[in-house]
Amino acid sequence: MAKELTNLEILSTRSGFNAAVRYIKGTIAIMEETGNLADLLYQAGNEEMTGERSGLVLNILLVDKLGYKTVSANLAAVAADLPVLAKEFEKWKGIDLIAAYHHPELGLLVANPKIPEELAAFGSLRKRELLVVYAGKGGSPADEDCRKAAELAIALFEGAKVKVPASFLKGSFAAKPLKGKPGRTASETAGTVKERALKVRKTAGGRAARGSRTAGPVQASGRAAPAAQRAAPPVITAAAPPAAAPAGPVKMTPRYAVVVQNELFHNGNVEAWKRIVASYNAKYPKLQVYIYYEGERILDINSLFKWGKVKHGSAIEFAVAGSDIKDVAKLQRYLAQGASHQFEAFLHGSVTNVLKLF
């Protein structure tokens, strides 16, 4: 009894109760649909069904209800080309497949491995990360073919060569084209329309102010701005809100390298990067910026400030994750300037305010 009460603690607050209701409604809506569960989750773009919550849906509907076979592995090796892998899985018309990858930064990602677009959202697979493959036959009982399919799928994700049984190739589980643009629910679309309407109302009053704003540290062409323009302080706004978790199908860009042009990546460069990233988060609160150095993720940019470690010519990498990624090229240009002797252009104004760069 005590354990049951513990499981129901989320219902003791209004926010928790409402979240549970939204989750239950979303699960019921998916149960009423037909097709590959990963496709349904991908196209719904429901925030309540992303991340670890999508794992609950997989267990409820695939394992508990339909009896799908599951095989999991911490990847000992990784396949180099996921689109090529998707073409192989497309041939498996006799088995329904769902893959769940525990991405080290993005959390749990779910995909139909027969759809290149969905599988590409995994980004680059990494060794030792958890991958779970679900295999079944829809409403029909899962058999040993399903378990074998899950095992062979794991082997393919690890880059191995396998012999596919002929029974996998014939059936009704062919990949189907995705319907519409994924990642936006009806309520989100309505919200976007309202936001556009508000922007139109504000256009007249804001046009003059926008026209008088000072240009950012780097010109749009990507070439360095003249010295006089670089010296001008960037526009500053109020402090940025905390970054929100991305909703809908999440994608991650490749890692982009920024070469340190300064003699050392010192404290001034660190502060410039912090303010550039804060500006990007203020403009795109549903996108997240990840920074890497020597293959490891940097959780605190301050840790890059170590005399003698990050020197001239070293490469610091970054990637952006979210469902509607924008302005990556501009972010890269600003970060490149922030890693050079021109970093001071980003240090104007109070540290509690945010530069308006994007």
Image (spheres, grey):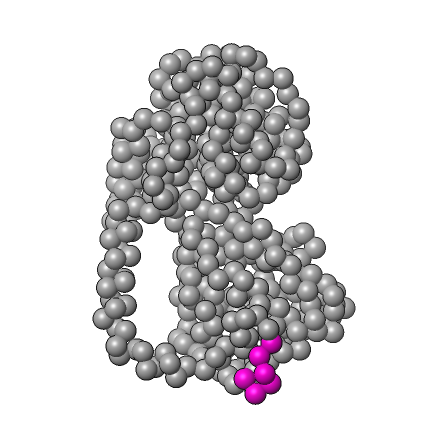
> Does the stretch in magenta take in 225?
yes
Position of residue 164 relative to residue 335, above or below, is: above
* Range shown magenta: 224-229
Determine the image quadrant of residue 287.
Answer: bottom left
Residue farthest to the right? Answer: 308
Relative to 132, 59 lies left or right: left
Q: Is residue 134 visible?
A: no
| Residue for point 27% across, 62% down | 195
Going 25% across and 57% down the picture, which residue do you hit?
193
Magenta span includes 31 = no
Counting from the top left corner in percent of width and height, residue 222 is at 57, 70
Q: Position of residue 50 (x, y in %)?
A: 40, 42
Quarter of the figure that contains the C terminus: bottom left
- Up the image or down, 51 lies above or below 29; here it is below
Q: Residue 313: x percent and y percent?
A: 74, 66
Which residue lies most toward the bottom here?
228
How many numbered marks, from 0 up? 0
What x and y, as percent, mark residue 61? 36, 26
**Residue at the front extreme?**
221
Query: What residue lies at 62% left-to-right and 68% top-to-bottom?
Result: 336
